[in-house]
């Protein structure tokens, strides 16, 4: 008789637990707010859109090159074509302060104590090449949307048709970034 009472209590407890529905996670695991949109500040497209000199929503390779050269010159306060670790630290801190989710640090990739223009511009050039889906040397608003840019107001308009005989393939120089790939010569189309 003593054995039946604990067994009956255990059976009742299991029945009540099973009827209670799904167990709730502990309070510290329950979501309290909607997750942050990682494209809050424009995603990776924001890295490039700041170089759109004429603000037409289409970014050309020439605009990126001219913008990056001007930006590098502004940071090169010693006017020696080389950013030292102190200058790089200031740039990286400003980029993180602007947007932590898309901050791309300036890095001395070859460890020579100097961040030259090629190292400074590697990330934007690489992103431009990745987003330039039709390899025409410009990023349209549709291509920029792939990197998190806001949808333009006239997005429902159809893009202009490609003219007969207009090239559609890759640019010469391959698909590598500004250095032409590991150990390769610099690409001429990014200078």
Image: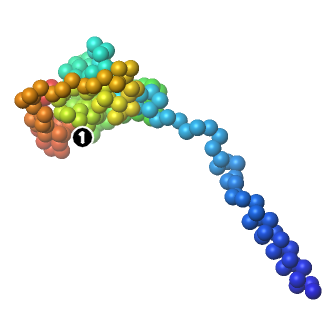
Q: Where, by quadrant of the figure, is residue 152 drawn?
A: top left
At which x and y percent is residue 159? 25, 25
Q: In the picture, which quadrant includes the C terminus?
A: top left
Q: Where, by quadrant of the figure, is residue 2 drawn?
A: bottom right
Is residue 176 shown above or below 76? below
User: Which residue: 70% across, 48% down?
Assistant: 27
98 or 56: nearer the eye? Answer: 56
86 or 138: nearer the eye? Answer: 138
At which x and y percent is residue 166? 9, 28
For disc 1, the neighbor class at 10 Å (few under 14, some 14 to 19, many from 20) is: few
User: Which residue: 35% across, 24% down?
Assistant: 155
Q: For this view, does 27 lie left or right of residue 143?
A: right
Q: Residue furthest top?
A: 54
Q: For this view, does 26 lie left or right of residue 74?
A: right
The residue under label 1 is: 110
User: Which residue: 24% across, 40% down?
Assistant: 110
112 or 42: nearer the eye? Answer: 42
Instruction: Judge whether residue 1 can be spotted in this image.
Output: yes
């Amino acid at each position: 008789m003593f054995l039946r009472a604990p067994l009956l209590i255990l059976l009742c407890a299991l029945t009540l637990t099973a009827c209670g529905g799904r167990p709730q996670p502990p309070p510290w695991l329950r979501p309290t707010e909607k997750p942050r949109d990682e494209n809050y500040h424009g995603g990776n497209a924001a890295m490039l859109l700041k170089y759109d000199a004429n603000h037409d929503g289409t970014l050309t390779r020439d605009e990126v090159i001219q913008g990056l050269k001007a930006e590098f010159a502004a940071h090169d306060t010693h006017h020696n074509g080389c950013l030292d670790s102190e200058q790089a630290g200031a740039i990286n801190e400003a980029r993180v302060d602007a947007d932590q989710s898309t901050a791309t640090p300036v890095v001395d990739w070859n460890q020579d104590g100097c961040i030259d223009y090629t190292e400074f511009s590697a990330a934007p050039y690489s992103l431009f090449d990745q987003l330039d889906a039709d390899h025409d040397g410009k990023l349209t608003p549709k291509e920029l949307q792939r990197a998190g840019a806001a949808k333009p107001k006239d997005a429902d308009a159809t893009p202009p048709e490609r003219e007969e005989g207009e090239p559609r393939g890759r640019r010469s120089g391959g698909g590598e970034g500004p250095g032409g790939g590991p150990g390769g010569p610099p690409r001429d189309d990014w200078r």
